[in-house]
Image: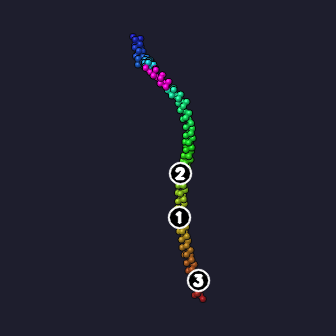
């Protein structure tokens, strides 16, 4: 009984998980189909492709190679010119970007200079008014001394 169950399980396992017989059948069918129907046709195609490749290698490739050498050199020269132009544009852009911070710093210095001049003018005005006040005090003092001298004489 156990042997029958194991045997049945083995058969189920083989049918479900063992794909070798199915794959081998498919492979045999594919080979038979390929050899039967396509054999001569594929061989003719391969011979034609080999002839075309020989013609390409002997006739067309040398001409293409010389044209490529000529035009690649021209393309390389044009790329070098383009590269130089791109570098020049990049340098100009970098200079422009560097000049912006310089302009900002210049504007900041000008603003600081205006503030400095305003403070300097305020201090000068304060000193001028203080100086004028002292002059007025001294004049008043000398006028008083003159009056006392005039009254004493």
Ranked by sequence position, the earlier of labels 3 and 1 is 1
Q: Which SS does the magenta portion mostly show? A: helix
Residue 114: which disc?
1
In this rendering, the label closer to the viewer, 2 or 1: 2
Residue 112 makes an appearance in the image = no
Q: Is residue 93 in the magenta section?
A: no
Which quadrant would the N terminus be assigned to in this image?
A: top left
21 or 46: nearer the viewer: 46
Ranked by sequence position, the earlier of labels 2 and 3 is 2
Apparent side of residue 138 relative to residue 25 in the rendered image (left or right): right
Calculate the distance from the C-alpha at mark 3 to the C-alpha at mark 1.
Answer: 46 Å
Calculate the distance from the C-alpha at mark 2 to the C-alpha at mark 1.
Answer: 32 Å
Q: Is residue 104 above or below residue 80?
A: below
Question: Which residue occupies 54% across, 31% down?
Answer: 59
Where is residue 58 shown, x and y percent of the image?
Answer: 55, 30
- Element under disc 2: helix
Instruction: Residue 32: name its quadrant.
Output: top left
Segment tinted magenta in the rendering: 37-48
Question: Which residue occupies 54% across, 75% down?
Answer: 133
- Which residue lies under the disc numbered 2? 93
- Element under disc 3: helix
In this rendering, the label closer to the viewer, 2 or 3: 2
Question: Which residue occupies 40% across, 11% down?
Answer: 4
Where is residue 109 shown, x and y percent of the image?
Answer: 54, 60
- Which residue lies under the disc numbered 3? 145
């Amino acid at each position: 009984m156990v042997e029958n169950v194991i045997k049945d399980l083995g058969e189920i396992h083989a049918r479900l998980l063992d794909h070798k017989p199915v794959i081998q059948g498919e492979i045999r069918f594919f080979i038979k189909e390929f050899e039967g129907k396509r054999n001569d046709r594929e061989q003719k195609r391969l011979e034609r492709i080999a002839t075309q490749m020989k013609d390409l290698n002997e006739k067309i490739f040398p001409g293409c190679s010389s044209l490529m050498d000529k035009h690649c050199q021209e393309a390389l020269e044009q790329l070098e010119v383009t590269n130089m132009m791109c570098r020049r544009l990049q340098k100009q852009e970098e200079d422009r970007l560097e000049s912006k911070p310089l302009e900002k710093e210049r504007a900041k210095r000008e603003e600081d200079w205006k503030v400095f001049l305003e403070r300097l003018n305020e201090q000068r005005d304060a000193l001028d008014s203080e100086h004028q006040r002292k002059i007025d005090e001294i004049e008043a003092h000398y006028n008083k001394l003159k009056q006392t001298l005039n009254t004493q004489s």
